[in-house]
Image (spheres, rainbow, N blue to C red):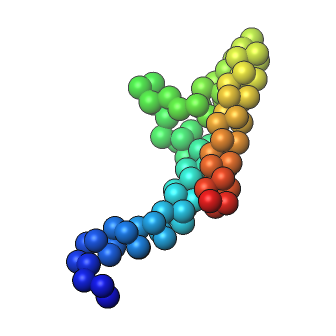
Amino acid sequence: MLGASRATAISRVTVPLMKAGLLSTFLLLLMLSMRELTVPLFLYTSDTEILSIAIYDAFENGGALREAAAMSVIYTAFMFVLSYIPRRLARQ
């Protein structure tokens, strides 16, 4: 309304308003995709090993229960950080 171009108006008004919602949506989808174990089990190959598969393999080996527990703690801490970020950004 005050003479700014469309690109300037979008970058200074629309993008800051959408930033919190888009970031929260991305982090929620990331947490949901990391939580899912059944799909990576079907897509697992020797070249592609993700954290959930590594935890499952360590648990199934029996002797590596400490490794599985340590990886689970790391996984839980990472998920906590991912769930904390949107809450922190929503307060701002």
Q: Is residue 50 above or below residue 89?
A: above
Q: Residue at x 58, y 31 (%)?
A: 51
Q: Nearer the viewer, residue 8 or 2?
A: 2
Is residue 16 visible in this depiction of the protein? yes
Q: Is residue 34 above or below residue 27?
A: above
Q: Position of residue 69 (x, y in %)?
A: 76, 23
Q: Residue at x 41, y 73 (%)?
A: 14
In this view, the residue farthest toward the front is 2
Locate the C terminus by quadrant. bottom right
Q: Residue at x 45, y 66 (%)?
A: 16
Q: Position of residue 29 (x, y in %)?
A: 56, 56
Q: Is residue 26 above or below residue 71?
A: below
Q: Position of residue 33 (x, y in %)?
A: 57, 50
Is residue 62 visible in this depiction of the protein? no
In this view, the residue farthest toward the top is 63
Left or right of 51: which side holds 11?
A: left
Q: Nearer the viewer, residue 26 or 57?
A: 26
Left or right of 2: which side holds 81?
A: right
Q: Position of residue 3 (x, y in %)?
A: 25, 83
Q: Nearer the viewer, residue 75 or 48?
A: 75
In this view, the residue farthest toward the bottom is 1
Q: Is residue 51 above or below residue 1?
A: above
Label total for image: 0
Q: Quadrant of residue 82?
A: top right
Q: Nearer the viewer, residue 16 or 36?
A: 16
Q: Quadrant of residue 8?
A: bottom left
Locate the N terminus by quadrant. bottom left
Q: Quadrant of residue 87?
A: bottom right
